[in-house]
Each structure stands twice: as C-alpha cells, then as structure tokens.
Image: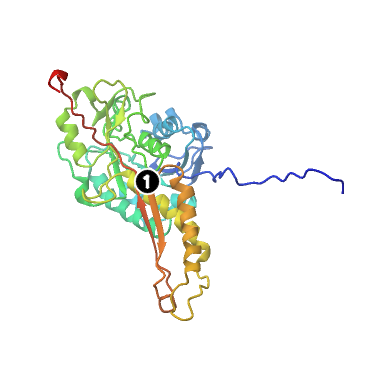
Amino acid sequence: MLNDVVITKVNGGLGRLLPLTDMISGLIANGVAVSGGVQLGTTYKLQRLEDATALQINAAYDTTNNVLVYEHIKEFFRINPNGVLWVLLVAKSVSFADMVDKTITTTAKKLLIDANGDINQLGVAYNPTSAVSTDTALLAAIPKAQLLAEEEYDLHRPVHIVLEGKGFDSTNITDLHSLEVPNVSVMVGQSKTVAGVSAHTTRYGAIGTLLGAISLASVNESIAWVRKFPLLGDNLQDFAIMNVASTSLTESLKSDINDAGYIFFNRPSRRTNIYFNDTHTGASLTSDFLYIENNRCINKATRLIYDALLDDLNAPIKVDPATGKLPSVVVKAMEALGNKAVEEGMLRADELSGFSFTIDEDQNILSSSELATELTLIPTGTARKITVKIGFSNPFNS
C-alpha cells in the first residue's frame, strides 16, 4: 500500500435529527362518497391540497353536498403548506358524539389507528343532514372526545382534540372550564364569508384554520402569538361568531366567550390582520393543562420518553448484591437514554426552558419488577398580557 494521507469521513457531528411528526394532524368529518373519488370509511393521507382535489374534494363538493370538508382542508394547507393531514369521512347520519366515541372503531378511533399513532392533533368537523342551530350535539361530543384522548394517551398515542363549535349559542354559553376536559378545545371562530353561505354554515367553526395553525406551531408556542400567526387570507377577510360580523361583536361578548374557554378570531386595535384570541382547553382554571401548548409539550415528551425506554422493557437489570438497590452505573445508563431523547427532541428546539429525568437508586426492583423514573419539564412562558408603566419625568427634579 502506497504512503498516503488518509482522511476518514465522520458522520453525526451536525446532530441532525429525524424529521419531526409534530405537524401530523387528523381530520374526521361527515361527508358524501364520490364515484371514482373519496369514499366513506376510508383513511387518506394528504400532503398537499391537490391530494384532496384528486379525491374530488373541491369547492363544488362542499356546495353540492351542503358540507364543509374542502373548506377545512384548504384552510389547513393555507396556514401550513408543509403539514400532513390524515382524513376520514363518515356518513352524514353519524352523530357528533359517535365520531369521537372511543368504543366505535369506524370513526375517530379508526383514523388514529390507521395513522399508526402519528396524529398529534385531531380536528372534528360536524356536517349533519340538517342545519345545526343549537349546541346540543357539540355538548354531547365534548365528554366523549375527552374519554377518547385519555384512552389514546394510555395507548401511547397522545393526541389533542379540537372540535368544531357547531351550533354555538352566545346567548347561553356553557363554561368549558367547568366540564374539566383538558384534552379538548372548541373552535367557534368563523370566516364571515363562509358563515354567510347557507343555513348549514351559519353556526360552523373554522376548524381547518385552527388545525393548520396548531400543526405549524412549535409545541411550546401559543398560536395566538401575534408576530408569528397572522391569519388573514383567502376566505378569511373578516371574522365572525354565529355569523355576526366582527364589527358587531361587542368587547363584552368576546370577553365572555373567551373566559368560558372557547377559541375564536380577533383583531387587536391598530391592526388589520386577524389572529386567534387564545389557546384555551376545557381544563379547570387551576390545571397545568389550561392551554393547547401545555398539552402538546407533555404529549411530545411522552412520545419521546416512551420511544427511548421501550427497548428496555422486560430487560434484565442487575442490582447491588449487598443492598438490592440499583447500582449507580445502571441508573446513569438509563438516565442517559431519557436525557438524550428529551434534549435532542425538545430542548435543542427551544421548546422547553429545561427538564430533568431522574431514577432513584433506592428502589426495590426485585420485589416490584418496576423501574420508577421521573421526568419533570420546565416549560417556556407565554406573554398573555404585557403591562407597561408610562409617565413623565422632569430631569430638573432628579
């Protein structure tokens, strides 16, 4: 072999990560089958709006069938062109509650399973045969959605569920926080243009816009962040609630709807664009999961730590022969797995302020066959209110 200068390429120094799945979302809605196009009960993975039109889901589809399906899909991809949207349509006869019933395997449960647990946020759009004028169906669906989310978490497929606020009644507002449904949010904001199309759209909620924004945001970000999430565009030129235009919505009414935990569109003073009011969930006011970003952070960390530790399920673990406790070398090796997963998956992306993953050496694994660990997240804050003190100063008096 001739003398040479040997140069070996080293891989991994850039610390590149696998593509994140945070943007993967799901949408279940009532619809109508099309010959040669979309079929009911079939799951479709959409990566661009053209994937929907290829299934003959287009503007004419919505108009002909008195539904909002294309509108929601179009809005999702308008807000997040790089999103991934799994879609499942069911018959118009399927109730709002049945769409999210965890015991029914042909509705949302099917969509979540077919997507192999990759769906991080699930939107539900209600398009029944008759126009909706009350929130009766919505209120029946909310607790069912919470039970579905709880079961999905137990199955290691954590998901946040956002419901279309179909039939919302601003004269009789149900306080969502009193329902204690932390994994559910309700969207009652509308495009005034869409709301005014027909009786079927008067009480709709712009679930596609909301779902798109959630999928676009980092898991720690509030989609009400004014700098990052302006929403004006396409049909969303003016906003409404119950087909009442923005200029006719009083500040008092908007405050009441906000305090009850609903999500809608708003336009701050001195701005022409449109934004979300907040990221409410139906959690109690003292809950750690009062906002969507709280849930998304926990859900992402849950997925990361599960994937990191799963390979060691049922693995043999040596103990100290004198004390029966866990040797420090074993503890450090296991802690390294958890720390690496959360650091690379969230901390480097500035989605956390900090975290700790610890394992107590002083545990009796020989008796319990259980390895107890603890992951504590320090979240980033959200400036929901900015206060400014302003006044004059006379330097002569200083």
Question: Which one is nearer the viewer's eye here, 307 or 112?
Answer: 307
Determine which residue is flagged by label 1. 353
Percent position of residue 222, x then y: 33, 38
Q: Is residue 30 left or right of residue 265?
A: right
Secondary element at tag 1: loop
Q: In this view, does 300 lie above or below 267?
A: below
Give, as a three-letter code, the residue at label 1.
Answer: Ser
Would residue 383 be visible to someone looking at this image? yes
| Residue at 26% across, 45% down | 138
Q: Quadrant of the C terminus?
A: top left
Percent position of residue 69, x then y: 40, 35
Question: Which one is nearer the viewer's eye here, 194 or 265?
Answer: 265
| Residue at 52% across, 73% down | 316
Quadrant in which residue 59 is drawn: top left
Label 1 environment density (alpha carbons within 10 Å; few <14, some 14–19, many ≥20): some
Percent position of residue 260, x then y: 19, 42
Quadrant in which residue 151 is drawn: bottom left
Percent position of residue 171, x then y: 15, 36
Would residue 169 be visible to someone looking at this image? no
Name, please, the residue furthest toward the left.
Answer: 397
| Residue at 14% across, 18% down | 396
| Residue at 39% across, 34% down | 72
Q: In this view, does 157 lie above or below 373?
A: above
